[in-house]
Amino acid sequence: MKLICFTYAGGNSTFYDQLKNELLPNVELIAAEYSGHGTRHRSPFYSDFDELANDMLVQIKESIVANEPYAIMGYSMGSISAVEVLKKLIDEKMPLPVHVFLAAHEPHTKAVYADYNKSDIDEFVKERTIKFGGVPDKLIDNKSFWRMYLPIYRADYSIIGKYKFEKLKLKSDIPATVFYSESDTSYEDMKNWNKYFENIDLLEYTGNHFFINEHFCAIAQEIKKRLV
């Protein structure tokens, strides 16, 4: 069983390392790498999620073999990536995942991300990323860190701001499990994933936006329970 994963805004494939180790040997986690991130840092950023999904599809096609079951997972921004990839898989009549895992992102348009002009966006990105717990304390005032990562965060927030859930045409009977923290995103907001998935299961954890870092063992168990 393969689990293909898409990461958060500003993140790279190493984000899933702890979960990957916890899932072995039953589930093989394949962490996709966005263009402009991590090992692909020299490649251009995406202009929108359609471009991202097309690129992800090229990456994961090798991992999707007919008659071999697989699942997909998205964390935060990766949840949008996951549903856009799923749309492409359906449209191209490719083998579909047996399960979809979504985490730390409600199906709600983040128009506020698109409202900032260039002179304000960097400060907005810094504040929001720090608030989410995405930056270690020792790096908050590190200019070299921000010089390297601000363009990545900025690019990702830009395409999130342009993405409109009102235009998402998806209604799937694939079982979906949604991980969330009430202190990050409310149950009332997260349960709206049922607009797009007929069969959803919501599981709550404690912690900030990156609750997976504290609960990766428990989350791995829930994933294995559904896949193995």
Image (spheres, grey):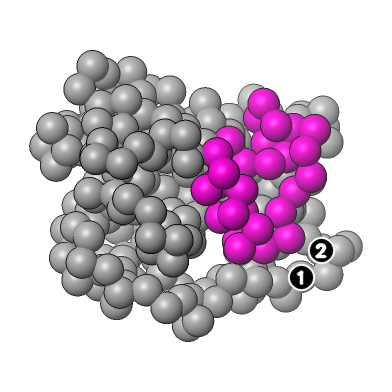
Question: Which secondary structure lies at badge 2?
Answer: helix
Q: Which residue is mark 2?
A: 120
* Residue kind at label 2, given as amino acid type: Asp
Q: Secondary structure at mark 1?
A: loop
Q: Tell me the CA gap for discs 2 and 1.
A: 6 Å
Residue 13: where, in percent of width, then height?
A: 53, 31
In reply to whether residue 41 is colored magenta, the answer given is yes
Residue at left offset 52%, top offset 48%: 57
**Image: 138 above or below 131:** above
Which residue extends farthest right? Answer: 119
Q: Residue 199 versus residue 161: which sits nearer the camera? A: 199
What's under tag 1, amino acid-wise?
A: Tyr
Task: Name the disc covering residue 96, or none.
Answer: none
Asked whether disc 2 touches disc 1, contact meaning CB atoms under 8 Å apart, the reply is yes
Which residue corresponds to the image point at 47% horizontal and 41% vertical from the top-left? Answer: 61
Does the image show residue 177?
Answer: yes
Quadrant location of residue 123?
Answer: bottom right
For the residue carrying disc 2, how many other residues have a C-alpha within 10 Å: few (<14), some (14-19), or many (20+)? few
Q: Is residue 223 above or below residue 25?
A: below
Left or right, 40 with reference to 119: left
Residue 98 appears at what percent x and percent y? Answer: 22, 49
Mark 1: few/some/many CA within 10 Å (<14, 14-19, 20+): some
Q: In the image, 92: left or right of 44?
A: left
Image vertical order of residue 69 relative to residue 153, above or below: above
Which range is magenta?
33-59
Taking the spot 24% from the left edge, 31% from the top edge, the residue there is 1
According to the picture, the residue beneath numbered tag 1 turns out to be 116
